[in-house]
Image (cartoon, rainbow, N blue to C red):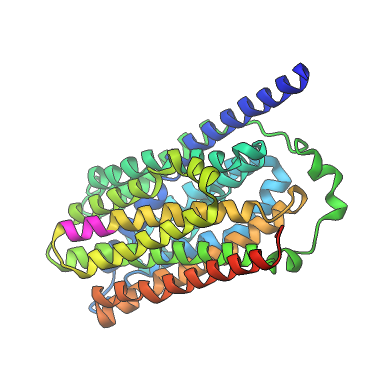
Amino acid sequence: MTAATAVVAGAGREARRTALLLAAAQAIVGSAAPIAISLGALAGQYLLGPDKSLATAPVTGFNLGVALGALPAAAIIRRLGHRGGFMTGTVITALGGLIATLALFQASFWLFAFGLGVIGVGGAFVQQFRFAAADNAPPQFKARAISFVLAGGIVTAILGPQIVIFTRELLAPVMFAGSFASILVLAAAGAVILSFLHISTGKSGSAGTAASDARPLVEIATQPRFVAALFCAVCAYALMSFVMTGAPLAMVGCGLSTDDATLGISWHVMAMFGPSFFTGSLIHRFGAERIVAIGLVLLIGCAAVALSGLELWHFWTALILLGLGWNFGFIGATAMVAASYHPSEKGKVQGFHDFVLFGSVAFASLMSGAVYNAWGWTMLNWLVFPVVALCFVALGALRITGLRRPGI
């Protein structure tokens, strides 16, 4: 009994060490995302001619890169291991930052969008951090491990926007080039942190012994719990991207400064990741479905505040509520997904999950620019309500299914 307790305690310590390293890497390498998101549309608008309808296309490129990179990232991580795979992701992130910087010097809109797409591919590896932390953790620590990693976004929320503020004119007269050049430094620092990562690929005994029992992806993806979890994750993330992508354009369009828009994104990202310190504990105590539902209510609050006025505080408050709603909705849905597959199935499930998720997010970011240019900021926020309603329908259907079929 004493030996067994020591083994469990050792596994817990190793899981915490892994989660903390991944959280640190998330904080540094993950800062490329707020740089791309806060400046992508503004730089796109800067590079375009009179027609600004494609201004959000670079942000779409970033999200599309995350989507297209999901399956290759999972395959590379399986092939090279977590440390080698994640360090490969930092190289790709650095390459994207270099391409985006060169594109700004050449005033090439589509090359810039491509560069953000490459940064997004690097971001696909960052998205795997939370799964790596959960897979390396004992069952009772999985939700907390996910929260630990996402809590690294607190630093991201501060670091990314501050880099934008202090570097966007660093390589003047080429606006924003300094911010994207800084991504190379972030990627290098992240690679150093990840070099200390040690996750045994053969750690999960069930993964090694049950590989032949792995279910087909179709069977896993048609489980009611998986369907509801993926749907809620997609909607929470897509709505966040949809509103957030349009917010800097709306703020600048209402006469606010670029710094106001950047700081708004900073508050938003901080709200996205700040609650992660306790979201895992809340999921453990109240259940993932209830936490997802709270996140959906917060998203409704975001839209309501955004529709109530166009002052700076309206934008910032709406973005904070948007971040909080994403945190509860997405982390809760991720915990539901993690509970729906076996260790031997994780690679294909996680790759499929992120492919669908970020493909939807990419579409949402592209539609954000189109909707904003056609109908304005008001319509962007009205569209939140029907999507949230569908999520509540999915959660309700899952609950009814669970009541009828206990044990699912």
In terms of image quadrants, where is residue 315? bottom left
Decide which of 189, 174 is in the foreground and name it: 189
- Residue 310: x %, y % from top left: 15, 66
Residue that extends furthest to the top in the rendered view of this protein: 2
Tell whether 293 sits left or right of 7. left
Tell whether 65 sits left or right of 59. right
For residue 134, above or below residue 117 = above
- Residue 135: x %, y % from top left: 66, 42
For residue 1, above or below residue 243 = above
For residue 251, above or below residue 23 = below
Q: Main secondary structure of the magenta part?
A: helix
Q: Does the rendering let one see residue 327?
A: yes
Residue 381 in the magenta stretch? The answer is no
Tell whether 13 sits left or right of 113. right
Residue that extends furthest to the bottom in the rendered view of this protein: 374
Q: Residue at x 66, y 23 (%)?
A: 9
Q: Which part of the image, by quadrant, shows the C terminus?
A: bottom right
Q: Residue at x 76, y 23 (%)?
A: 4
Q: Residue at x 47, y 41 (%)?
A: 26
Magenta residues, as a range?
313-318
Q: Does the rendering let one see residue 119?
A: no
